[in-house]
Image (spheres, rainbow, N blue to C red):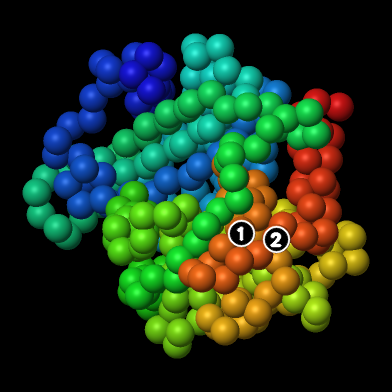
Amino acid sequence: MADLQVCVDGQICPAAEATVPVADRGFMYGDGIFETLRVYGGRVFAWERHRQRLRRGCELLRIDLAVDDDTLADWIDALLTANGLREAYLKIMVSRGVTGGRLRPSHDATGTVVIVCEPMARGGHAGAPSWETPASCAIVETQRTPDAAIPSRLKPLAYLNGIIAHLEAPAWTDEPLMQDGAGHIAEGAVSNLFMVDEEGLHTPPVDGDLLAGVTRAVVCELGAAEGLPVTQEPINRDRLYGADEVFLTNTTWEIRPVDRVDAVRYDPGPVTALLQHRYDAEIETFAYA
């Protein structure tokens, strides 16, 4: 990323020269949120959903995101242009800004907005996935932070929960799977979980301790359009071990098949392949038609 341009509060500059004050609460406390987006053919996919979630997160934390949606979109376009990118990973980070050293937030600070991007391969039918192999997963003892502690609908800058899960997981793990307090699989460190069995397609429910991802929602809609409605219900360890297919979703991976959970092996199957095909078709229509 050192050779790329970044955007700090609307100012484009080389990443190596970008600065944020050490007193910024994003650095001091992880006091802020972020959104990860994919850019296909120069366009941000599912921008409206990501924009709404970013706004809701700021409202929930009472962060003053002192930039309107059109200006934020202009900053994104300017950053992509500065880097000459039409296929990219994009991350928007919003902190509460500089308010001094006390933990209790002040209400007179203006949020800091940092946007970074990296090149990615083309999406759609003619593209290539961002992952090289199916994911190998391990169920870890580190629990997903409960909604009662930190609202699950937030994407906080402080991602320590997922980092600790990765530190616990075996070295061969691509993605740790975290459980809730009841012992149900909630989600991966950076992904949502789906499984397929003889009863159909299943994913943990949105009212549980999980972040309901944008890609998760798109996949649920695509499944329903193909006559594969998703059942949202708790999934325990034994049920996951007995699944016919397992896959993960997030913005950068899109749909990534799982070939292993602990000692149990899976083959990428027809339902996963169908949904990957439909997702690629969605991207083709969105960006390249």
Q: Amino acid at mark 2?
A: Asp
Q: Where residue 214 sits in the image (x, y, percent)?
A: 62, 53
User: How far, Cα to Cα, is label 1 from label 2?
Assistant: 6 Å
Give the label on residue 29, or none: none
As helix, strand or loop, the secondary structure at mark 1 comes to strand
Q: Position of residue 66 (x, y in %)?
A: 40, 37
Location of the N terminus by quadrant is: top left
Q: Residue furthest left?
A: 101
Give residue 60's quadrant in the image: bottom left
Please tell me whether mark 2 sits on a helix, a strand or a loop: loop
Q: Quadrant of the C terminus?
A: top right
- Confirm or deny contact between disc 1 and disc 2 (CB under 8 A): yes
- Above or below residue 22? Residue 227 is below
Question: In this picture, is 245 found above or below 256?
Answer: below
Q: Give the residue at x 62% y 82%.
A: 239
Residue found 61% across the figure and 58% down from its top: 258
Label 1: which residue? Answer: 259
The answer to which image quadrant residue 176 occupies is bottom left
In the image, taking residue 262 as reference, residue 148 lies left or right, namely left
Q: Residue at x 47, y 27 (%)?
A: 117
How far across and how far down the image is residue 154, in percent? 44, 59
At x 63% / y 27%, what residue is drawn? Answer: 121
Task: Depth check: give the residue in front, 130 or 25.
Answer: 130
To which residue does mark 2 refer?
Answer: 267
- The answer to whether residue 222 of the structure is visible from this angle is no
66 sits to left or right of 244 = left
Q: Position of residue 42 (x, y in %)?
A: 66, 23
Observer able to see residue 92? yes
Chain-order first, disc 1 or disc 2? 1
Mark 2 neighbour density, 10 Å: few (under 14) some (14–19) many (20 or more): few
- Type of residue at label 1? Asp
